[in-house]
Image: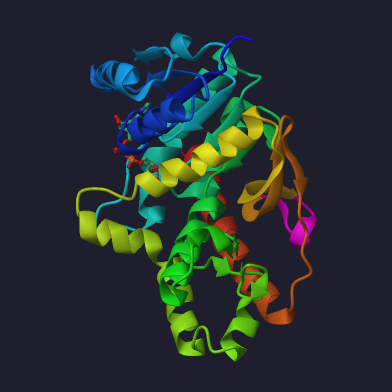
Amino acid sequence: MARAKIALVGAGNIGGTLALLTAMKELGDVVLFDIAEGIPQGKALDIAQSGPVEGYDAAFVGANDYSAIAGADVVIVTAGVARKPGMSRDDLLGINIKVMNAVGQGIKENCPDAFVICITNPLDAMVWVLREACGLPHNRVVGMAGVLDSARFRHFLAEEMNVSVEDVSAFVLGGHGDTMVPMVRHSTVAGIPLPDLIEMGWIAKDKLDAIVDRTRNGGAEIVGLLKTGSAFYAPASSAIAMAESYLKDKKRVLPCAAYLEGQYGVQGLYVGVPTVIGANGVERIVELKLNAEEQTMLDHSVESVRGLVEACKTISADG
Ligand code: APR
């Protein structure tokens, strides 16, 4: 069988890491696309040259022309600008809307059958703009946020309880911002829910509250440390987990920004929810029964996503 083709639109920090992970996992051939001349070509050549050492076989192409992404099976979008200290994800809105419109057009013309994963921030709004611009079915365009936010939550929990990250399962609902809803009741260590672990003395309630807060601000913490950009290793790993589930039809249950049509009482917006990702893209949206407190937090998060999407519509209408 021919190798899958994976197009990475944006060859910056996340794009380069995505290319390396794609190679290490032998998911397919890689096209790195960017508007910056030389960057995608240089990264493609560099990563190709680690192939003989690492032992992966894949073709790597760098390009500044959208024709290079023709026929891609998966497109992962990181094009745009990243945050600097003091900037919120929402500050990126104006610039990144224009970028999403251009990328969407490139996808529409060159690979309309692809599975598209958006990473560009502000995520929940940018994935909406990208979907509008490319016109693909909603189940084939998703946003990467929940896997990353959950991974941050899992990392902090594992560290606090001194257990393997592998045995910590956690997920986060809602928008990819400080209104996200880490789901304490549904997060477990080896199947034991966090409220039980508090009773068992494995974690103190105040420690858990601090971890929930730290998860919500996980991206800003890294921006504050790096000073010249935002997180890239964990975002890349998270998007690769989604791409792999699609390419191998694994049907993993992964939280991601999916288009809701009535689920959780939300109509016509991309919001972070657990989904099943397989060969048909987002194959199912997992609709959990929330308690009143969780529903209130989710509603608040959805309102902030709605505000951003409305702002996008206004900015787009103004040209
Ligand atoms: N088309 C293609 N590429 C573009 C365009 C465009 N119109 N505009 C900018 N780019 C490229 C830049 O040249 C740069 O190489 O996008 C790349 C972005 O890379 P970085 O600045 O290194 O940003 P990165 O850390 O990879 O994050 C990308 O993901 O998590 C989000 O908030 C983050 O929105 C940001 C995005």
Res 102 seen here: no
Tell me where residue 139 appears, x and y as whole percent. 71, 36
Tell me where residue 302 appears, x and y as whole percent. 62, 62
Rendered residue at 66%/19% (across/down): 113
Q: Nearer the viewer, residue 159 or 298?
A: 159
Res 160 seen here: yes
Rendered residue at 60%/78% (across/down): 194
Q: Is residue 115 a member of the stretch shown in magenta?
A: no
How are the colours assigned in the image?
rainbow
Magenta segment: 261-269
Rendered residue at 34%/19% (across/down): 51
Count the numbered circles shown. Answer: 0
Quarter of the rendering containing residue 293: bottom right
Q: Nearer the viewer, residue 143 or 254?
A: 254
Q: In this image, 52 relative to 165: left or right? A: left
Q: Nearer the viewer, residue 208 or 110?
A: 208
Rendered residue at 52%/84% (across/down): 202
Looking at the picture, does residue 311 appear above or below residue 187? above
